[in-house]
Image (cartoon, rainbow, N blue to C red):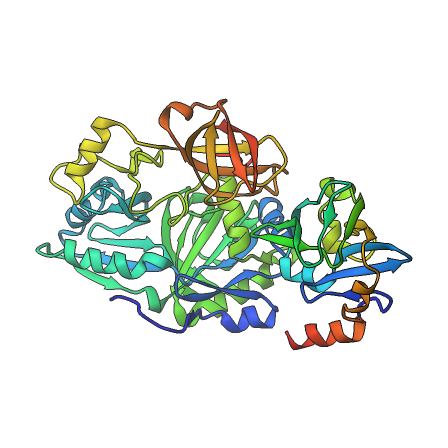
Amino acid sequence: MVPQDLRYTKDHEWVRIEGDMATVGITDYAAEQLGDIVFVELPELGRSVTQFTAVGVIESVKAVSDLFAPVSGEVVDSNAELSDAPEMLNSDPYGKGWMLRLKLADLSQADALMDATAYEALTAEA
Amino acid sequence: MAQSHDAPLATPLADRHAARGARMVEFGGWLMPLQYTGILEEHRAVRTRAGVFDLSHMGELFVEGPDAAAALAHALTSDPAGLAVGRAHYSMICFPEGGILDDLIIYRLGDERFMVVANASNAGAVSDALTERLEGYRVILDDRSLATGLVALQGPRSAGVLAPLTDIALDELRYYAIADGNVAGVPALVARTGYTGEDGFEVFVDVAAAGTVWDAIFDAGAGAGVVPVGLGARDTLRLEAGMPLYGNELGRDTTPFEAGLGRVVKLDKPGDFVGRAALEKAHAEGPRKKLVGLVVRGRGIARHGYEVFAGDRRTGTVTSGTLSPTLGEPIAMAYVTPSDAEPGTIVSVGIRDQRVPAQVVPLPFYRRPV
């Protein structure tokens, strides 16, 4: 069961919306698929990101994967602890493994994302 | 016999991997376990305790007859005539142009009997090449790859786990030696060789007995914390140990000298061997590129195919790279221009749109504690 209060993308990112702020991470399904995560590269503060474009990199032992922005906005915070402890994406992807905070450009974008039920259906089929 | 199967082959241990929920991957025409619990955990288990590998995909070719040593000396770069019975050495089989067809371990099982162990991805090509090269010698080539199962036990606790299971005296089995006996009640060849940089054993058995040996090692090793280890950790372990991988560091466009493995080319052995003329020329002219170890000094992981620069000048390419679980730093192997190969040299690696500093270091990155 994924957290019920979040929205999800088909690229396995989650978003928590609080007013016009979004917190972003990857799901436990994504972390499980990636395997042990050993390196994370996040966009710099102040950067404007566009929904569904690649904004960062998540590297596992064997592979490099893109991090996609689930919504458009301005990067106002990123999780500096992931630099020394990328494994938090594996151990606590919805909590300590949060990745970015964005100031939303368009509040309606989040509504178009999947809810928990739809995301669970997606990953059940996989 | 060339392998040209459409679907990947299953090893004799496929059901065991499935039972453990292993994530499987296709490799060299076989369906192999990539990981069980996770690459980092499996890697650390081998460095601190012991891990068990299913290597049944590897090729095992037996060469037997009065001319066996001479025939192999002609076919390969090394001189198997110099091997004592019960000993092994690392070797290569090269193309006539001097490039590498495969890297091998040759085990001498008798005066007139050798076992050649080839990489899974090249087993068919090695078999074909040996068939051709052994022509005219009084030998038979018996490709037993599909009839042989191989279970490797690697790590500091290996000997303690394996000893009660075998009649072979492991304390008398030196590194790069091989002995004939029983393991878990089945006939086996036990070699003290491996691809991890740890002490360990490779146990060759009839394919039908592989499951018995696998199960017995886990039963005996439960108290020692023995775990199964997949190809993911096999790759990070060998990279830390500075060992080359065919397809990455070794290939048709590379001579053994360029890979820093000139010691396997015995130019002073008697008689011709396939590739001699090209390798003598290569040796005389010096390498066009040199294999080095790199530690990345900035933020980023250097990976296969990434470009290496000395200042603004392109100097080479990364062949393998990862985050070293033991060192906690990104490590890589790369070919560079020989003048940039001196340990200590600062280079940079193109990682996405950045040039990240890295330093040339001697191989291996890791040596097991004595």
Location of residue B209 (image quadrant): bottom left
Of all residues, the one furthest to the left in this rendering is B136
Residue A121 drawn above or below residue B35:
below
User: Is B160 on the left-hand or right-hand side of B263?
Assistant: right
* Residue B370 visible from this viewpoint: no
Point 30% across, 31% down: residue: B288
**Image position of B135 (left or right of B262):** left
- State left or right for residue B337 relative to residue B358: left
- Is residue B332 among the parts visible in the rendering? yes
Residue projecting furthest to the right: A19
The image position of residue A114, as x and y in percent, is 76, 70
Residue for point 77% across, 40% down: A45
Residue B78 picture location, percent across and down: 24, 41
- The image shows residue A109 at horizontal and vertical percentages of 79, 63
Count of marks placed on residues: 0
Question: Foreground: B55 or A72?
Answer: A72
Which residue corresponds to the image point at 88% horizontal and 55% vertical from the top-left? A20
Q: As rendered, which of B175 and A97 lies closer to the eye?
A: A97
